[in-house]
Amino acid sequence: MLRSLRRREFPRGNYLWIVVNGFEYFFASGFPGSVRVFIASLPGLSGLHVTQKPLIRIKDNNSNTKTHHPRVNTRREVNKFKPTIYLQLIASNYRSVTGLYLRLIGLVVLLVAMYIAFMTSKYYLLFTTNLVFFAAIVLAWNIIGGYAGQLDLGSAGYMGVGAIVSSILSNNIGLHPLISIILGGLSSALLAGAIGFPMFRFGVREVWYALSTAAIVVILNNAVRLLIGPYEYYLRVRPIKTYDELYLATSIALVLVFLLNYAVNNSRLGYYLKAIREDELAAEAIGVDTRRYKLLALMIYAFIVGSLGYLYVVMIGYFYTYRFFDTGISVSIAILGIIGGLGSIEGCLVSAFLLRGVGEYLRTSLAHIIPGLHLLLYGAVLIALGVIEPEGIPGIARRFTTLLKTTKRPMGGVK
Amino acid sequence: MSTLLETRKLTKRFGGIIAVKEVDFKVEKGVIKGLIGPNGSGKTTLINCITGVHRPDEGRVFFESRDITGLPPHRVAKIGIARTWQIVRPFKKMTVLEAVMTSALIRVKDLSVARSEAVDVLKLLGFTEELMNRRGSDITLVQHKLVDLARAIVLKPKLLFVDEIAAGLRPVEVEGLIDLLRRVHRELDITMVVVEHLMTFIMKLSDDIAVMHEGQLIAEGSPEEVAKNPRVVEVYLGMRV
Amino acid sequence: MFEPTAFDLSAIVTGVVNGLVLGSLYALASLGLALIFGVLDIINFAHGDILMISSYIIYLIALSTGNPWVALLSSLALFALFGAGVYRGIIHYVLGKEPLIQIAITVGLGLILQNLALALFRAEPRALPSTLFPYPLSIGPLTLSANRVFVALVSIILCILVHYYSTRTKLGLASRAVAENREAAWLMGINVPLIYMATFTIGVLLTTTAAFLWMQIGPVDPYLGTIFGLLCWIIVALGGLGGVAGIIASGFIIGVLDSLGSMFLTPSGKYIPMYIAFILTIWFKPRGLFGRR
C-alpha cells in the first residue's frame, strides 16, 4: 500500500508512518494535527516517523536547508526500537478530526443528560430549552463577534425579523414551517447584507459599529411597532406540540450551529476572519478582502439568528410582537460571547450554559425580591474579567493549565 | 532586465503637506533596491501609495506594465506585491504558525498544504517548532518582525517591500537580518525594495539605491555613486555614511 | 399613527424651542463623554447610567433635605469621589486596551448601576415634587416655563465654561496635550495619570450637573441611562471631537429631532429619525458633521 502511494505524486501535507511489527501504517494529510500524541504504552509499536514535503524550493548551494523529499527508512525505523516516542505535530488544538468527534459527543451527551435531568418538570425543561436556544445564538454571534471581531449588538434585530417573517409566512400564507424558517433566515441575511454593505464600505468599526447595530435594533423596534401595532399575534399553525419536541428541535439547532462554527473555524474563512479581528489593515495587506469576508460573516450570523427566530416564537408561546427588538437581548448575547472568549466555541458554550444558567435561575427565582439580579451578576463578571483576564473563559482555562504544568515541572526543568 | 514596478509622477498630499511629490520610481526585476532618506522624507507614504493603503492624488503606478493605481490593498497583494510594516502589526491571539498560514491560505485552498508551506517559510527564517506554536502575544520584537516577513514571503510575491525592518533592533540582530534578507532574495527569487534610514544597512544589502528627501527622489544609482553624490551628502550631513 | 397632532406654526415653533432646550441639556450631558473619550480614549458605555444614578441621588437628597441646592452640592461632592473611585478601580485597568474590552467593562459597570437602581428604587419613574422656577415666562409671542429657560441657560453657560477650561486653563491645556500625544506630554513633565483621573472626574461632574438639570424637567427611572447613553454617543458621533461648538450644535440637532419627532410621530417613534440621522452620519461623514481631529 505504501509502495503504491510512494510512486504517485504525494499530496502535500503532514504524513505519519507508524511501523508496527514490520507492517507499515500510513496516515495521509488531515491526520489529527493536534496537540501532543503520546504513544508510549501502545504494545508492538516499533517506529514512528513524521515527514512533510517541502514546498519552497531551496537552492542546493545552501547546506543546512536542502530540499528533502518525504522519506521513510522503514528498516532503520524498525531496527531502532523506541520504547517511548513523544511527538508533537504542528497545529493548534482545534484542527483535529478526533477532537471534533469528542467535542460533538460531549455536546450531545450534555444535551441528553440535561433532558434526562429535567424531563419530569415542564418548567425546568422549558428553562433548559431557553438555555440551549441562547447557547445557539451566542455561538452564531461568535462568527461575527468572536472570529471577525465586530462587536455586533444587532442580534435581537435579526432574530426579530426572522421570527416575524417566518411566523407570517407559516401562519398567514400557510407555507411549511421549515420553508418559512429558511425564508425568515434569508430575509434576515438580506437585511444584514443591506446594512452591512454600506457599513463596511464606509469603514464603520469598533464603537461606531456597535452603536450603529444597536441603533438599527431601536429603529426596527419602532418601525415594526408602527407597522404591526402594539399587539401580540398568535400563531394557528403549531407543528411543535410538546416541550420535549421543542427541546429536541432546539438541541438539533444548537448542534447544527456548533458544527457550522467548527467548519468556519477550520476553513479559510475562519483564518481570514481571525486575521481581520487581530489587525484589519495587516489582513488586507496580505490579500484578505476584508469587506467581503466581514459581510459574509455578518450574513451567515444573521441567517442563523434569523432562522432561530421561529424557535423563539415557539418557545415563548407561539406569538410574535414588536417587543422582539430588544437591545437588552442583543447586549446580553454579546456579553456572553465576550465572556466566552472571542472565537472560542467551548468558551461560548460554557458561558451560555453556566453564566446564563445561573443568571436565569436568579432572575426567575429572585425576581420579586431583587429584579435584575442576573444582570448585576453579568456586570460583576464583566468588570472582573476586564480587570483580571480580558480573554475570558479560555484565558482562565489557559492560566489554569499553565498552573498545573508549572506545579508538575518546576521552572528549572524546562530549558 | 525588465522593469517590474514603475511609478509615474506619483503625488500624495495630506492637507497642505505634500508627502510624496511627482516621484518616478522604478524597480528592475531580480534586484534588491534600497530606498533611503531621512525620517519623514515620504518613503513609507510612497509604499503606502503603491500598495493601496493610500490612494495617490496624482500619478500612476504600473506593475508588470499593468496600471494598478488605486487598487485596494488586497488586490495589490494578490497580484504579487507584498510588504512588511515599519511598526509591526502582529496577530496577537493567533499562533505564529496560524498567522503565517492565514497568509498562505490566500494562495492555496487546502489547510494542510498551507500549514506545511507556512512551516517551511518559518523554518527558513529560523523558527523552531516550539516557537511556531507560541501565540503572537508571547514573542519578542525581532520575532515579530520575522513573522511579518514570513507572512509576506509565503504569499510568494514578485516584489517585496521591507519597511524599516531594522528599526528598534540591536546591531547583532540587524547583522542577522541582512544575511536573512539576502538569503530570501537569493533562494526564493523575490525582488525586494528595502526601505531604511540607516545608510550602513542599505549599503551592505542593496544593488541599487534611490534616495528620497522631502517627498522627492534626489538621487539614484549604485551604493558607491549614491555615497559620492553631493546632494545626498548634503541631506545626510552629519550622518556617517 | 402618522397623523400630525397640529400643523400650525406656533406649535412647530414651540416644538423647536423645546427641542433647543432639550438639545442644550443633551449637549451638556454629552460633554463629559466627549471629554473622557477625547482625552482618555476610553469608550464609556456606562455614561448614561452614571447620569441616571446621579439623578436618583439628587432626587433622594432633594427629597430628604427639601433644598435642591444642597442636593446639587452634596451630590457633586459625592460624585467627585465616585468618579475618582471608578477611575482607579476600573477604568485605569483598561487604558489603552482593545476597544472591545473597554466596551465590555463599561457595559458591566452600566449594568451594575442600572440594576442597583432597579433593585433599590424599582421601575416606576420618579420626579421631584417641585421644580426651581415653577412659573411661566413670556418672551415675545412665546410662552415658556422659566424652568426650561433656566435649564437651557445653565447648560449653555457650562458648555462655554468647559470650552474656556480646555483652551485657557493650565489643566485643560495639559489634558489636550495628553489627548494629542501621550508620550510627548509625559516627557514634557505633565503628570499623565493625574490628568486622566482629573479629566474622568470632571466628566462625571459635568454629567452630575446635567442630571441635576434633567431632574428639573423630567422624571428618572432605571432605564433613563440606556436612553441617555445612546443619545450622548450619537451627539458625540455627530459633533465629532472637534470641540464644544460641535457638541452644542449636534445637541441642538438631536434635541429638535427629538422634540419634533415626538410631536409628529409616536413618543417612541421619535427615535427613528434620530437614529437614522446618526447612522447616515456615521456612514457618510465618519468624522462627524463638524469635523474631528
Image (cartoon, rainbow, N blue to C red):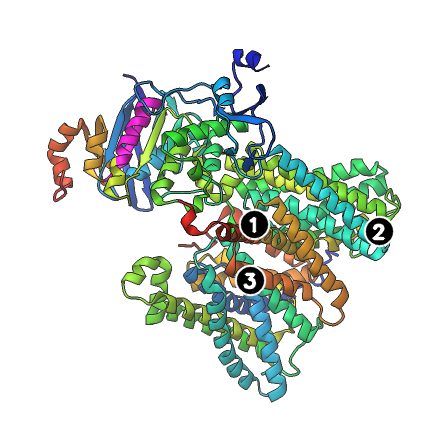
Q: Which residues make up the magenta segment?
A: B176-197
Q: Position of residue C134 (x, y in %)?
A: 62, 83
How many residues crowd around disc 2 within 10 Å: few (fewer than 14), some, or many (20 or more)? some
Say whether mark 1 and mark 3 are on the same chain: yes
CA–CA distance in space, label 3 to label 1: 17 Å
> First in sequence: mark 3 or mark 1?
3
> First in sequence: mark 2 or mark 1?
2
Q: Position of residue B218 (x, y in %)?
A: 19, 33
Task: Tell me the amino acid under the disc marked 3.
Answer: Ile
Nearer to us of marks 2 and 3 is: 2
Task: Tell me the amino acid under the disc marked 1.
Answer: Pro
Give the label on residue A383, or none.
3
Q: Nearer the viewer, residue B170 or C67?
A: B170
Q: Nearer the viewer, residue C272 or C8?
A: C272
CA–CA distance in space, label 2 to label 1: 31 Å
Is residue A86 something that shows in the picture? yes
